[in-house]
Amino acid sequence: MKLKVTEQGVTIPKEFFAGVEEVEVHQENGCLVMVPTQSLQKPRVLGLHAGSIQMSDDFDEPLPDEFWLGDK
């Protein structure tokens, strides 16, 4: 497919992006790369895995010097 570049930009036919509503464009090795972003637009569901992670009681305690300096 050849497209003409004008001062207004480039128009890409919608058929080229069947089922895609939004793309992210970046340059890679001298080429323009268009990546669909619709998978990132799914709404997040709060509380989906409630209770599956537990934090230890000493989570906020300072780490020992051995952690930072290594075992000697």
Image (tube, helix red, strand yellow):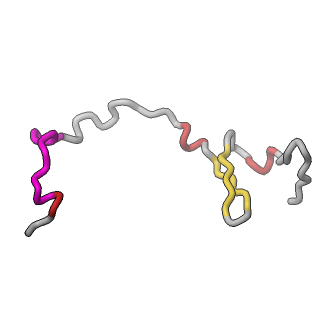
Query: Would you identify the image quadrant in which residue 46 lies?
Result: top left
Residue extending farthest top:
46
Q: Which residues are magenta?
A: 55-67
Question: At 33% across and 31% down in the image, what residue appears?
Answer: 47
Question: At 69% across and 57% down in the image, what residue appears?
Answer: 27
Residue extending farthest left:
72
> If the image is split into quadrants, where does the N terminus sit?
bottom right
For this view, does 16 lie left or right of residue 58? Answer: right
Residue toward you, 60 or 34: 60
Residue toward you, 70 or 27: 70
Residue toward you, 37 or 28: 28
Question: At 23% across and 40% down in the image, what residue appears?
Answer: 52
| Position above or below: 62 against 47 | below
| Position above or below: 53 against 32 | above
Q: Is residue 59 magenta?
A: yes
Q: Is residue 63 magenta?
A: yes
Identify the main secondary structure in magenta. loop
Residue extending farthest bottom:
72
For this view, does 67 lie left or right of residue 2? Answer: left
Q: Give x and y (percent) for residue 44.
A: 44, 34
How many circles with numbers are drawn on the protein?
Answer: 0
Question: At 73% across and 62% down in the image, what residue appears?
Answer: 31
> If the image is split into quadrants, where does the C terminus sit?
bottom left
Q: Give x and y (percent) for residue 36.
A: 64, 48
